[in-house]
Every structure is written in structure tokens, then in C-alpha cells.
Amino acid sequence: MDDKEAKALEEEISSYKDRKEYAKCVKRMDERVTETTDPELRAIALMAKSTCAAQMNDLTLAENAAFAIDMEPLSPEMRNYVKLVQADISSLTGQSARAESLLLAIIASEEAHAEQQPDALYAAFVRLGILCVTANRYTAALEHLEKASLLMPDGYLRDDIAIDLAYCLQASGRLDE
């Protein structure tokens, strides 16, 4: 993958998202998918298409884009990012078991535990914790959210995680904590 081209694509995607031009993003990512043969650039474009479609509440389009990504030629690190998007879309479409399975696969991967990909690991723990909160599985949620809070950098979702942790502690009867 050409790093310059990937950076340009990421900047283009960010500009659409910053302006909340999700329909334009979906259309442009369709063009990008047909313009490139690079599997990682195609994956980035399809992930952007999926997340923008989800923002428009077109969950069918979001799911189709996320699961159209050919995982085989991707690097293990890129596969983890694809799985994060697929887990998000699965969660949005009410497929919690599928989302959980994808997140657990990320957590089990060697790449997520490597120094170059800590963000995928804490993102997986955060999302898994939130899935568990939604399912009223507070003990499991606590475990995942605590791991996420140890891994995440300062400021990044720190307050949101603290609120979820407090909620889980309360629901688990651990009021003093």
C-alpha cells in the first residue's frame, strides 16, 4: 500500500465526516473502490462507506459495505480495524453475538497486543465492555472496561469509560468503589 495514497484517502474521508457529508462520502468511496486494486485501500474505502452509511442510518448499506471487504489479502493489523467496523455495524443491526465474536477475535490476535496497534486493543475492550453493559452483564463489562482504561491514552474516552465503570460497579453492588 502506498502510504501517500493512504494518507490522502484518510484526509478525504475525514473531510467528508467533519462536514457531515455522509452521502457524498458514500458516493466517493464507491468510486474509490472501483479506482484501486490495492486491497488495503479498498478496505479503507469500504470501511468509510460503511461508517458513513451508518451515520445516515442506512444499516443495510453499512453492513453490505463492511462485510464486502476481502480479508484474505489484508495485513493482520488491517484485519483488526476491519473487524472493529464490522463489530460496530453488527452491534447497530442487533447482532450482538456476532459483534462480540469479532471483538474477541481482535483481543485474541497477536497484532492487537503488539506495540504498533494498542488502539485496536483498547477499542475492542471498550466496545466489548459496552456490549456487556447493554446486555446487563456487568461483571464482564467491568473486566473489559477496566482493561480498556489501563490501555487507553489520557483523554481518549476516559470520562465515558469512567461513567460506564461507575454504572457497572453500582449495578454489581460495589457502591464503595
Image (cartoon, grey):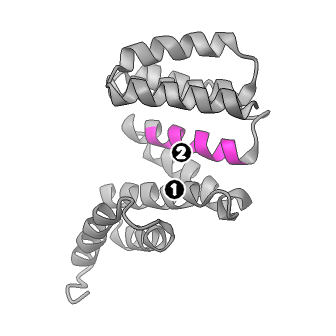
- The residue under the point 31% across, 71% down is 165
As for residue 170 lying within the magenta part, the answer is: no
Question: On the rendered image, what quadrant is the N terminus found in?
Answer: top right
**Are the two marked residues, 2 and 1, in contact with CB atoms closer than 8 angstroms?**
yes
Residue 67 located left or right of residue 41:
left
Q: Picture coordinates of residue 23 (x, y %)? A: 38, 15
**Which is nearer the eye, 59 or 55?**
55
Label 2 sits on what residue type? Answer: Leu
> Does 80 lie within the magenta span?
yes
Left or right of 145? Residue 160 is: left
Q: Main secondary structure of the magenta part?
A: helix
From mark 2 to mark 1, how far is it between C-alphas? 7 Å
Residue 141 image offset from top left, x and y in percent: 39, 67
Residue 73 position by quadrant: top right
Q: Around disc 1, counting alpha carbons within 10 Å, would you say few (fewer than 14), some (14 to 19), or many (20 or more)?
A: many
- Name the residue tied to disc 2: 84
What are the residue bounds of the magenta stretch?
Answer: 77-88
Looking at the picture, which amino acid does disc 1 mark? Answer: Ala
Q: Is residue 94 above or below residue 126?
A: above
Q: Is residue 10 left or right of residue 149?
A: right
The residue wearing badge 1 is 124
